Amino acid sequence: MSATAGGPDPTRRRALVVAGLATLIGVLIAVLPGHRGWFDIGVYHGAVGHWVRGGELYGWTTGNGYGFTYPPFAAVSMLPMAALAWYPTIVVNLLLTAVATGFLLMLLVDPLARREGWSRWYAFALAACLLAGLNPVRDTVSFGQVNLLLVALVYADLWLLERGHRAAGVGIGLAAAIKLTPAVFIGYLLVTRRWRAAATAIAASVAATLLAAAVAPGASRTFFTEALWDTDRVGQLAYVSNQSLLGMVARLHPEHPDRRLWLLLVVAAAAVWAVRVRRAVAAGDERAGFALTGVVACLVSPVTWVHHLVWLVPGLVVVAATTLPWPPTEPAARRRLGAGIAGYVLLSSGLVWVFANNSGGPLGFLGGNAYLWVTVGMLLAVPVRVREPRRDHPSFTGHCGAITAEPLSGAVGRRPE
Protein backbone atom coordinates (compact mmCIF):
# COMPACT_ATOMS: atom_id res chain seq x y z
CA MET A 1 0.00 0.00 0.00
CA SER A 2 1.59 3.23 -1.12
CA ALA A 3 1.66 6.39 0.91
CA THR A 4 -0.58 9.25 -0.13
CA ALA A 5 1.07 12.39 -1.40
CA GLY A 6 2.75 14.11 1.49
CA GLY A 7 1.45 11.52 3.99
CA PRO A 8 3.31 8.89 5.99
CA ASP A 9 3.69 5.36 4.68
CA PRO A 10 1.22 3.28 6.78
CA THR A 11 3.32 0.13 6.41
CA ARG A 12 6.38 1.89 7.72
CA ARG A 13 4.39 3.45 10.56
CA ARG A 14 3.04 0.05 11.55
CA ALA A 15 6.49 -1.48 11.42
CA LEU A 16 7.75 1.24 13.74
CA VAL A 17 4.86 0.64 16.16
CA VAL A 18 5.60 -3.11 16.24
CA ALA A 19 9.34 -2.51 16.65
CA GLY A 20 8.74 -0.06 19.48
CA LEU A 21 6.29 -2.33 21.29
CA ALA A 22 8.55 -5.36 20.85
CA THR A 23 11.51 -3.41 22.18
CA LEU A 24 9.56 -2.17 25.20
CA ILE A 25 8.31 -5.64 26.11
CA GLY A 26 11.73 -7.15 25.47
CA VAL A 27 13.37 -4.67 27.83
CA LEU A 28 10.72 -5.26 30.49
CA ILE A 29 11.19 -9.03 30.26
CA ALA A 30 14.96 -8.59 30.49
CA VAL A 31 14.97 -6.31 33.52
CA LEU A 32 12.04 -7.66 35.52
CA PRO A 33 12.86 -10.52 37.89
CA GLY A 34 11.30 -13.87 37.18
CA HIS A 35 13.35 -15.95 34.75
CA ARG A 36 12.88 -19.54 35.90
CA GLY A 37 16.12 -21.02 34.59
CA TRP A 38 14.41 -23.72 32.47
CA PHE A 39 13.53 -25.55 35.68
CA ASP A 40 10.65 -27.67 34.38
CA ILE A 41 12.39 -28.76 31.23
CA GLY A 42 15.26 -29.74 33.50
CA VAL A 43 12.84 -32.03 35.32
CA TYR A 44 11.62 -33.54 32.03
CA HIS A 45 15.15 -33.99 30.71
CA GLY A 46 16.51 -35.44 33.94
CA ALA A 47 13.61 -37.82 34.63
CA VAL A 48 13.36 -39.15 31.07
CA GLY A 49 17.13 -39.61 30.84
CA HIS A 50 17.15 -41.42 34.18
CA TRP A 51 14.30 -43.64 33.00
CA VAL A 52 16.00 -44.54 29.70
CA ARG A 53 19.14 -45.53 31.62
CA GLY A 54 17.12 -48.06 33.64
CA GLY A 55 15.97 -45.97 36.61
CA GLU A 56 12.41 -45.41 37.84
CA LEU A 57 10.63 -42.56 36.07
CA TYR A 58 8.80 -41.39 39.20
CA GLY A 59 11.74 -42.13 41.48
CA TRP A 60 14.00 -39.41 40.02
CA THR A 61 13.95 -36.02 41.78
CA THR A 62 15.81 -32.74 41.62
CA GLY A 63 18.04 -31.59 44.45
CA ASN A 64 15.08 -29.84 46.10
CA GLY A 65 12.77 -32.85 45.78
CA TYR A 66 10.74 -32.18 42.65
CA GLY A 67 10.05 -35.09 40.32
CA PHE A 68 8.19 -35.97 37.15
CA THR A 69 4.44 -35.53 37.76
CA TYR A 70 2.84 -36.14 34.36
CA PRO A 71 1.19 -39.37 33.13
CA PRO A 72 3.47 -41.98 31.53
CA PHE A 73 2.36 -41.06 27.99
CA ALA A 74 3.98 -37.66 28.51
CA ALA A 75 7.29 -39.39 29.24
CA VAL A 76 6.88 -41.57 26.14
CA SER A 77 6.27 -38.39 24.10
CA MET A 78 9.42 -36.85 25.57
CA LEU A 79 11.69 -39.83 24.87
CA PRO A 80 13.62 -37.94 22.12
CA MET A 81 14.96 -35.71 24.91
CA ALA A 82 17.10 -38.61 26.09
CA ALA A 83 19.12 -38.36 22.88
CA LEU A 84 19.73 -34.62 23.28
CA ALA A 85 22.17 -32.71 25.43
CA TRP A 86 20.92 -29.96 27.75
CA TYR A 87 21.15 -26.89 25.50
CA PRO A 88 19.76 -28.58 22.37
CA THR A 89 16.81 -29.70 24.51
CA ILE A 90 16.11 -26.07 25.43
CA VAL A 91 16.37 -25.00 21.78
CA VAL A 92 13.93 -27.70 20.63
CA ASN A 93 11.50 -26.74 23.39
CA LEU A 94 11.64 -23.09 22.35
CA LEU A 95 11.13 -23.94 18.68
CA LEU A 96 8.13 -26.17 19.40
CA THR A 97 6.66 -23.51 21.69
CA ALA A 98 7.12 -20.88 18.97
CA VAL A 99 5.36 -23.07 16.39
CA ALA A 100 2.49 -23.79 18.77
CA THR A 101 2.16 -20.10 19.64
CA GLY A 102 2.15 -19.13 15.97
CA PHE A 103 -0.64 -21.61 15.27
CA LEU A 104 -2.69 -20.28 18.20
CA LEU A 105 -2.25 -16.67 17.16
CA MET A 106 -3.30 -17.41 13.59
CA LEU A 107 -6.33 -19.37 14.76
CA LEU A 108 -7.44 -16.77 17.31
CA VAL A 109 -6.43 -13.49 15.68
CA ASP A 110 -6.69 -14.09 11.93
CA PRO A 111 -10.53 -14.17 11.93
CA LEU A 112 -10.54 -10.81 13.70
CA ALA A 113 -8.11 -9.32 11.18
CA ARG A 114 -10.19 -10.55 8.24
CA ARG A 115 -13.46 -9.40 9.79
CA GLU A 116 -12.15 -5.91 10.51
CA GLY A 117 -10.12 -5.59 7.31
CA TRP A 118 -6.82 -5.22 9.17
CA SER A 119 -3.39 -5.91 7.78
CA ARG A 120 -2.90 -9.52 8.85
CA TRP A 121 0.84 -9.28 9.53
CA TYR A 122 0.23 -6.17 11.67
CA ALA A 123 -2.52 -7.82 13.72
CA PHE A 124 -0.38 -10.93 14.19
CA ALA A 125 2.69 -8.91 15.24
CA LEU A 126 0.76 -6.80 17.77
CA ALA A 127 -0.91 -9.89 19.22
CA ALA A 128 2.47 -11.64 19.52
CA CYS A 129 3.89 -8.68 21.44
CA LEU A 130 0.91 -8.52 23.80
CA LEU A 131 1.07 -12.28 24.32
CA ALA A 132 4.75 -12.10 25.24
CA GLY A 133 3.94 -9.57 27.96
CA LEU A 134 1.69 -11.91 29.93
CA ASN A 135 3.21 -13.33 33.11
CA PRO A 136 1.86 -16.88 32.43
CA VAL A 137 3.46 -16.86 28.98
CA ARG A 138 6.76 -15.55 30.31
CA ASP A 139 6.77 -18.27 32.95
CA THR A 140 5.84 -20.98 30.44
CA VAL A 141 8.79 -20.04 28.25
CA SER A 142 11.35 -19.54 31.02
CA PHE A 143 10.34 -22.72 32.87
CA GLY A 144 10.51 -24.66 29.58
CA GLN A 145 6.92 -25.79 30.15
CA VAL A 146 4.63 -27.62 27.70
CA ASN A 147 1.54 -25.49 28.35
CA LEU A 148 1.36 -23.72 25.01
CA LEU A 149 1.90 -27.01 23.17
CA LEU A 150 -1.10 -28.47 25.00
CA VAL A 151 -3.26 -25.42 24.30
CA ALA A 152 -2.35 -25.75 20.61
CA LEU A 153 -3.31 -29.46 20.63
CA VAL A 154 -6.69 -28.67 22.17
CA TYR A 155 -7.34 -25.74 19.86
CA ALA A 156 -6.56 -27.86 16.83
CA ASP A 157 -9.86 -29.51 17.75
CA LEU A 158 -11.59 -26.12 17.76
CA TRP A 159 -10.41 -25.71 14.17
CA LEU A 160 -11.72 -29.19 13.33
CA LEU A 161 -15.06 -28.71 15.11
CA GLU A 162 -15.72 -25.45 13.31
CA ARG A 163 -15.34 -27.39 10.04
CA GLY A 164 -17.33 -30.42 11.12
CA HIS A 165 -14.32 -32.70 10.70
CA ARG A 166 -14.62 -36.31 11.89
CA ALA A 167 -11.18 -36.21 13.56
CA ALA A 168 -12.30 -33.56 16.06
CA GLY A 169 -11.42 -34.78 19.55
CA VAL A 170 -8.05 -36.35 18.81
CA GLY A 171 -6.10 -33.31 20.00
CA ILE A 172 -8.07 -33.09 23.25
CA GLY A 173 -7.58 -36.80 23.90
CA LEU A 174 -3.83 -36.68 23.35
CA ALA A 175 -3.49 -33.54 25.48
CA ALA A 176 -5.42 -35.24 28.32
CA ALA A 177 -3.09 -38.25 28.11
CA ILE A 178 -0.08 -35.94 28.45
CA LYS A 179 -1.44 -33.82 31.29
CA LEU A 180 -4.68 -34.20 33.23
CA THR A 181 -5.96 -30.60 33.06
CA PRO A 182 -7.03 -30.72 29.36
CA ALA A 183 -9.41 -33.59 30.24
CA VAL A 184 -11.87 -30.83 31.21
CA PHE A 185 -12.38 -30.33 27.46
CA ILE A 186 -13.73 -33.88 27.23
CA GLY A 187 -16.28 -32.69 29.80
CA TYR A 188 -17.02 -29.76 27.47
CA LEU A 189 -17.77 -32.12 24.58
CA LEU A 190 -20.03 -34.22 26.82
CA VAL A 191 -21.90 -31.27 28.37
CA THR A 192 -22.56 -29.81 24.92
CA ARG A 193 -23.59 -33.24 23.57
CA ARG A 194 -20.86 -33.55 20.97
CA TRP A 195 -21.01 -37.29 21.28
CA ARG A 196 -18.83 -38.24 18.33
CA ALA A 197 -16.07 -35.77 19.23
CA ALA A 198 -16.27 -36.82 22.89
CA ALA A 199 -15.97 -40.50 21.93
CA THR A 200 -13.00 -39.68 19.70
CA ALA A 201 -11.30 -37.75 22.51
CA ILE A 202 -11.87 -40.55 25.03
CA ALA A 203 -10.65 -43.17 22.55
CA ALA A 204 -7.51 -41.15 21.75
CA SER A 205 -6.74 -40.64 25.44
CA VAL A 206 -7.31 -44.29 26.32
CA ALA A 207 -5.25 -45.48 23.35
CA ALA A 208 -2.35 -43.20 24.27
CA THR A 209 -2.52 -44.33 27.91
CA LEU A 210 -2.58 -48.00 26.91
CA LEU A 211 0.37 -47.44 24.59
CA ALA A 212 2.30 -45.95 27.49
CA ALA A 213 1.27 -48.89 29.68
CA ALA A 214 2.61 -51.31 27.07
CA VAL A 215 5.89 -49.41 26.80
CA ALA A 216 6.26 -48.71 30.53
CA PRO A 217 4.02 -50.97 32.65
CA GLY A 218 5.93 -50.32 35.86
CA ALA A 219 5.83 -46.54 35.47
CA SER A 220 2.13 -46.67 34.59
CA ARG A 221 1.37 -48.71 37.69
CA THR A 222 3.34 -46.30 39.88
CA PHE A 223 1.64 -43.24 38.43
CA PHE A 224 -1.94 -44.41 38.78
CA THR A 225 -1.53 -46.04 42.18
CA GLU A 226 0.92 -43.65 43.87
CA ALA A 227 2.21 -40.54 42.08
CA LEU A 228 -1.21 -39.31 40.89
CA TRP A 229 -2.48 -39.05 44.47
CA ASP A 230 0.64 -37.52 46.01
CA THR A 231 -0.01 -33.76 45.88
CA ASP A 232 3.27 -33.06 47.69
CA ARG A 233 5.13 -34.02 44.49
CA VAL A 234 4.03 -30.81 42.75
CA GLY A 235 4.69 -28.38 45.61
CA GLN A 236 2.79 -26.68 48.42
CA LEU A 237 -0.90 -26.03 47.75
CA ALA A 238 -0.77 -22.73 49.67
CA TYR A 239 2.14 -21.32 47.65
CA VAL A 240 1.10 -18.08 45.99
CA SER A 241 1.82 -19.45 42.50
CA ASN A 242 -1.14 -21.81 42.91
CA GLN A 243 -3.90 -19.58 41.56
CA SER A 244 -6.68 -22.18 41.72
CA LEU A 245 -9.69 -22.22 44.01
CA LEU A 246 -7.92 -24.78 46.20
CA GLY A 247 -4.84 -22.56 46.31
CA MET A 248 -6.95 -19.70 47.63
CA VAL A 249 -8.63 -21.95 50.22
CA ALA A 250 -5.26 -23.34 51.28
CA ARG A 251 -3.86 -19.86 51.83
CA LEU A 252 -6.71 -19.19 54.27
CA HIS A 253 -5.60 -22.14 56.43
CA PRO A 254 -2.27 -23.52 55.14
CA GLU A 255 -2.05 -26.31 57.70
CA HIS A 256 -5.62 -27.59 57.28
CA PRO A 257 -7.28 -26.39 54.04
CA ASP A 258 -11.05 -26.67 54.16
CA ARG A 259 -11.67 -29.23 51.39
CA ARG A 260 -15.44 -28.96 51.85
CA LEU A 261 -15.31 -25.25 51.03
CA TRP A 262 -13.14 -26.03 48.01
CA LEU A 263 -15.57 -28.68 46.72
CA LEU A 264 -18.47 -26.26 47.17
CA LEU A 265 -16.64 -23.62 45.13
CA VAL A 266 -15.75 -26.19 42.47
CA VAL A 267 -19.39 -27.27 42.14
CA ALA A 268 -20.49 -23.63 41.84
CA ALA A 269 -17.85 -22.88 39.19
CA ALA A 270 -18.72 -26.03 37.24
CA ALA A 271 -22.42 -25.18 37.32
CA VAL A 272 -21.85 -21.67 35.95
CA TRP A 273 -19.53 -23.09 33.30
CA ALA A 274 -21.99 -25.79 32.20
CA VAL A 275 -24.82 -23.30 31.73
CA ARG A 276 -22.66 -20.82 29.84
CA VAL A 277 -20.96 -23.29 27.49
CA ARG A 278 -24.27 -24.86 26.52
CA ARG A 279 -25.58 -21.40 25.68
CA ALA A 280 -22.44 -20.67 23.71
CA VAL A 281 -22.60 -23.81 21.59
CA ALA A 282 -26.36 -23.58 21.05
CA ALA A 283 -25.74 -20.04 19.79
CA GLY A 284 -22.97 -21.27 17.49
CA ASP A 285 -20.19 -19.62 19.49
CA GLU A 286 -17.64 -22.44 19.72
CA ARG A 287 -14.81 -20.07 20.56
CA ALA A 288 -16.52 -18.73 23.66
CA GLY A 289 -17.25 -22.33 24.72
CA PHE A 290 -13.61 -23.34 24.40
CA ALA A 291 -12.45 -20.15 26.13
CA LEU A 292 -14.80 -20.71 29.08
CA THR A 293 -13.60 -24.30 29.39
CA GLY A 294 -9.98 -23.18 29.62
CA VAL A 295 -11.03 -20.71 32.32
CA VAL A 296 -12.90 -23.26 34.44
CA ALA A 297 -10.02 -25.74 34.09
CA CYS A 298 -7.77 -23.23 35.84
CA LEU A 299 -10.31 -22.77 38.62
CA VAL A 300 -11.19 -26.38 39.44
CA SER A 301 -7.75 -27.96 39.07
CA PRO A 302 -6.24 -28.54 42.53
CA VAL A 303 -3.00 -26.96 41.33
CA THR A 304 -2.93 -24.10 38.82
CA TRP A 305 0.53 -22.59 38.77
CA VAL A 306 0.84 -19.16 37.21
CA HIS A 307 2.24 -20.65 34.00
CA HIS A 308 -0.94 -22.77 33.63
CA LEU A 309 -2.93 -19.56 33.15
CA VAL A 310 -2.03 -19.49 29.45
CA TRP A 311 -5.44 -21.19 29.17
CA LEU A 312 -6.92 -17.71 29.78
CA VAL A 313 -5.43 -16.25 26.59
CA PRO A 314 -8.30 -17.33 24.27
CA GLY A 315 -10.77 -15.76 26.70
CA LEU A 316 -8.93 -12.44 26.48
CA VAL A 317 -9.19 -12.65 22.67
CA VAL A 318 -12.95 -13.34 22.86
CA VAL A 319 -13.38 -10.32 25.14
CA ALA A 320 -11.34 -8.16 22.75
CA ALA A 321 -13.40 -9.35 19.79
CA THR A 322 -16.61 -8.04 21.34
CA THR A 323 -15.23 -4.50 21.70
CA LEU A 324 -14.69 -4.13 17.94
CA PRO A 325 -14.90 -2.07 15.81
CA TRP A 326 -12.48 0.07 17.76
CA PRO A 327 -12.87 2.44 19.52
CA PRO A 328 -16.11 1.02 20.89
CA THR A 329 -19.10 3.34 21.09
CA GLU A 330 -21.62 1.18 22.94
CA PRO A 331 -21.45 1.38 26.77
CA ALA A 332 -21.39 -2.41 27.14
CA ALA A 333 -18.47 -2.70 24.73
CA ARG A 334 -16.62 0.04 26.60
CA ARG A 335 -17.11 -1.79 29.88
CA ARG A 336 -15.82 -5.00 28.33
CA LEU A 337 -12.82 -3.15 26.93
CA GLY A 338 -12.02 -1.67 30.34
CA ALA A 339 -12.40 -5.03 32.06
CA GLY A 340 -10.28 -6.75 29.42
CA ILE A 341 -7.49 -4.17 29.72
CA ALA A 342 -7.56 -4.43 33.52
CA GLY A 343 -7.37 -8.23 33.34
CA TYR A 344 -4.50 -8.11 30.87
CA VAL A 345 -2.55 -5.59 32.97
CA LEU A 346 -3.02 -7.68 36.11
CA LEU A 347 -1.94 -10.89 34.36
CA SER A 348 1.14 -9.09 33.02
CA SER A 349 2.07 -7.35 36.25
CA GLY A 350 3.45 -10.20 38.36
CA LEU A 351 1.47 -8.76 41.27
CA VAL A 352 0.96 -12.10 43.00
CA TRP A 353 4.71 -12.50 43.47
CA VAL A 354 4.76 -9.44 45.72
CA PHE A 355 2.92 -11.62 48.25
CA ALA A 356 5.03 -14.75 47.75
CA ASN A 357 6.38 -14.62 51.29
CA ASN A 358 3.32 -13.21 53.03
CA SER A 359 -0.17 -13.69 51.63
CA GLY A 360 -1.91 -13.24 54.99
CA GLY A 361 -4.27 -10.43 56.02
CA PRO A 362 -6.88 -8.67 53.84
CA LEU A 363 -4.30 -7.09 51.53
CA GLY A 364 -2.44 -10.37 51.12
CA PHE A 365 -5.71 -12.17 50.43
CA LEU A 366 -6.61 -9.71 47.68
CA GLY A 367 -3.17 -9.34 46.12
CA GLY A 368 -2.02 -12.92 46.61
CA ASN A 369 -5.07 -14.16 44.69
CA ALA A 370 -5.05 -11.43 42.04
CA TYR A 371 -4.85 -13.82 39.08
CA LEU A 372 -7.60 -15.97 40.58
CA TRP A 373 -9.93 -12.95 40.68
CA VAL A 374 -9.23 -12.35 36.97
CA THR A 375 -10.07 -15.99 36.26
CA VAL A 376 -13.33 -15.84 38.21
CA GLY A 377 -14.25 -12.62 36.43
CA MET A 378 -13.65 -14.27 33.06
CA LEU A 379 -15.84 -17.25 33.95
CA LEU A 380 -18.69 -14.83 34.67
CA ALA A 381 -18.07 -12.26 31.96
CA VAL A 382 -16.51 -13.85 28.85
CA PRO A 383 -19.22 -12.81 26.39
CA VAL A 384 -21.36 -15.32 24.55
CA ARG A 385 -22.82 -14.25 21.23
CA VAL A 386 -26.60 -14.65 21.09
CA ARG A 387 -28.63 -15.65 18.07
CA GLU A 388 -31.49 -17.99 17.17
CA PRO A 389 -30.40 -21.49 18.25
CA ARG A 390 -29.91 -24.09 15.53
CA ARG A 391 -32.77 -26.59 15.57
CA ASP A 392 -30.50 -29.32 14.20
CA HIS A 393 -27.94 -28.81 16.96
CA PRO A 394 -27.84 -31.45 19.73
CA SER A 395 -27.96 -28.74 22.41
CA PHE A 396 -31.30 -27.41 21.10
CA THR A 397 -33.96 -28.14 23.70
CA GLY A 398 -37.05 -27.64 21.58
CA HIS A 399 -37.96 -23.99 22.08
CA CYS A 400 -36.15 -20.70 21.82
CA GLY A 401 -37.00 -19.76 25.37
CA ALA A 402 -34.51 -22.37 26.59
CA ILE A 403 -31.67 -20.13 25.45
CA THR A 404 -31.40 -17.09 27.68
CA ALA A 405 -29.97 -13.99 26.07
CA GLU A 406 -26.69 -12.82 27.58
CA PRO A 407 -26.02 -9.08 27.83
CA LEU A 408 -22.55 -9.47 26.35
CA SER A 409 -22.48 -10.50 22.71
CA GLY A 410 -20.43 -10.33 19.53
CA ALA A 411 -17.74 -12.97 20.00
CA VAL A 412 -15.98 -14.12 16.89
CA GLY A 413 -16.18 -17.55 15.31
CA ARG A 414 -19.26 -19.04 13.65
CA ARG A 415 -20.07 -22.69 13.23
CA PRO A 416 -20.92 -23.59 9.64
CA GLU A 417 -24.64 -23.49 8.97
Image (cartoon, rainbow, N blue to C red):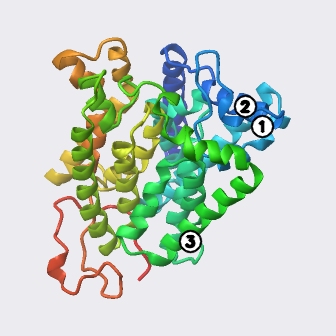
User: Label 2 sits on what residue type?
Assistant: His
Quote the CA–CA distance across marks 1 and 3: 29 Å
* Residue 404 position in % (x across, y down): 16, 70
Task: Please report the residue visible at 42 percent of the width from the left and 24 percent of the height from the top.
Answer: 236
Q: Alpha-carbon neighbours of circle 1 within 10 Å: few (<14), some, or many (≥20)? A: many
Q: Nearer the viewer, residue 111 or 201?
A: 201
Quote the CA–CA distance across marks 2 and 3: 31 Å
| Residue 175 shown left or right of residue 319 in the figure | right
Q: Which residue in the protein does label 3 denote?
A: 200
Q: Nearer the viewer, residue 241 or 213?
A: 213
Q: Is residue 59 visible?
A: yes
* Residue 133 position in % (x across, y down): 46, 31
| Residue 78 shown left or right of residue 400 in the figure | right
Q: Which residue in the protein does label 1 denote?
A: 81
Dot 1: what SS?
A: helix
Residue 381 lies, with reference to residue 97, above or below; the image says below
Residue 135 placement: quadrant: top left
- Upstream in the sequence, badge 1 or badge 3? 1
User: Label 1 sits on what residue type?
Assistant: Met
- Upstream in the sequence, badge 2 or badge 1? 2
Q: Which residue in the protein does label 2 denote?
A: 45
Residue 104 lies, with reference to residue 28, above or below; the image says below
Q: Nearer the viewer, residue 212 or 275?
A: 212
Quote the CA–CA distance across marks 2 and 1: 6 Å
* Residue 131 position in % (x across, y down): 48, 38
Dot 3: what SS?
A: helix
* Residue 400 position in % (x across, y down): 18, 82
- Upstream in the sequence, badge 2 or badge 3? 2
Dot 2: what SS?
A: helix
